[in-house]
Amino acid sequence: MVVTSESVLSVQKQACPECGEEIVAVKGYIPWCQGCNWNLNPLHKAKNPTLFERYYLKIGNFAGEKLLQSVMTEPMSKPTSLGVVFAYLIAGAVHLTSVVILFCGIWLAIAGWGNFFFMAAALLCLIVAWVTRPRIGKMPKDIVSRTEFPTLYRIVDEISEKMGAKKVDGITIDFAYNAAFGSYGLSRKNVIHLGVPLISVLKPEEFVALLGHELGHGVNGDSTRGVFVGTAIRTLMEWRYFIKPDQILERNGSLVELAMVPINLLLLLLSKGIEGIVFVLAHLLWQNKQRAEYLADSLAVQVGGLQAKLALLEKLHLEHIFAFAMQRILTGGAIGSAAEEIRSQFGQIPASEIERVRRMEQSADVRLDSTHPPTAYRIQYLKSRGDTAAAYQISTEDQMLLEKEWRHLEEKTETKFIRYYRDHSYLLY
């Protein structure tokens, strides 16, 4: 809901300090000028970018525009770029190194059995091989049961069937204003993670679009979710953690610690090299990740409809409304339950605030270190494909059953939910 009537809002009129145009400032929201965009995004602190940062943004915007035109021309194509090929080669080298370390440990243990130095080296190699072994991710333990949420699971299963996607093996509930998709274990079991605050403010058709997008990640072949590249990245991060020294030299260090300075410097240099490889891997997969988001958006539109997907994208940018509601809850200013307060705040957002958020989306740059394209590009891509009716709709009966299940969940987790944000209040600022 968007409130447009000033009679139901506490407003104050003032002149824009930049252009002099009248500003209608709504109490509780950021005052800004629709004429010249003064104070559009006050939380974004302007700074003078370095030469590298300027070129980084310039390259990002160029690459993002080029990719947008590509997906608009061939929306469902999945070309294998040179970047993906190089990413797999690097990942292969990482896994090969892990195998070499393991076999070195075994060979040293066999060849030097009984020799202290050989055995110590073998033990070190085996420890490194074990600590930095590829991890495929364990199935989350907090999966909600199908018996407790039969309607939720049935809706997800029906949407999966519509999309030709594999049925999910589980659903988890967390307290983030977000949702996610993940695959775990050798068999790559699919799990959807749903954030209570986000789902609580979505309309049924927006919920369908959200599920369509997340399930789409299981269909579109995102390389970063693959076992091969994903485990290589995790292995690299383990190597970095394993070898990076806490500090080069402690204050009042002993002679031994002083002698360790060259070794610590070498280890620090190696850890920086590993960080560089991770950086390169992430950028090699950039186009693939961005294309995967476009394809997931396209699949979401097919199942949920264009208007629902556009509304969902807009709502995803209203996390600051959720943060404000949580601040009221934590300071005792809320009336009713936490879920009721959150829905109340989302039910009275003024039209000027929605417009401010839209303009911020339009001004966002393409970043080469971002997994998602700018929302403005995603909207442009979706609109270029024309209006699409929803292939799946939640029936009125299922809406009632789903709402009952979700309200029960909100009541059951409210204390834990509030405690979580009280302990992690920095997430709200």
Image (cartoon, rainbow, N blue to C red):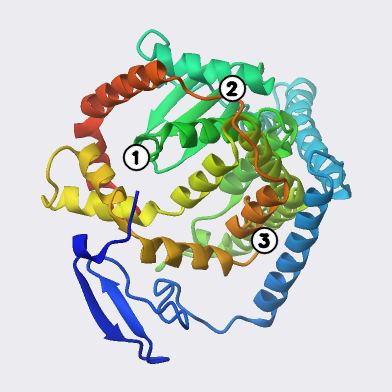
Tell me where residue 113 sits by quadrant: top right
Query: Would residue 71 be visible to someone looking at this image?
Result: yes
Disc 3: which residue:
269
* Foreground tag (1 vs 2): 1
Q: Earlier in the sequence, mark 1 or mark 2?
A: 2
SS assignment at label 2 = strand
The residue tagged 1 is 197
Q: Is residue 185 visible?
A: no
**Mark 1 Cα shell of 10 Å, populated few (<14), some (14-19), many (≥20):** many
Q: Amino acid at mark 1?
A: Pro
Q: Earlier in the sequence, mark 1 or mark 3?
A: 1
Q: Which residue is mark 2?
A: 190
Q: Residue at x 68, y 60 (%)?
A: 368
Q: Three-letter amino acid code at disc 2?
A: Asn
Relative placement, left or right, of 21 versus 127 is left
Query: Could you tell which of marks 3 and 2 lies nearer the N-terminus?
Result: 2
Residue at 57%, 66% in the rendered image: 362
- In the rendered view, would you say 276 is above or below 48? above
User: Is 341 drawn above or below residue 17 in the view shown?
Assistant: above
For discs 3 and 2, the disc positioned in front in the rendered view:
2
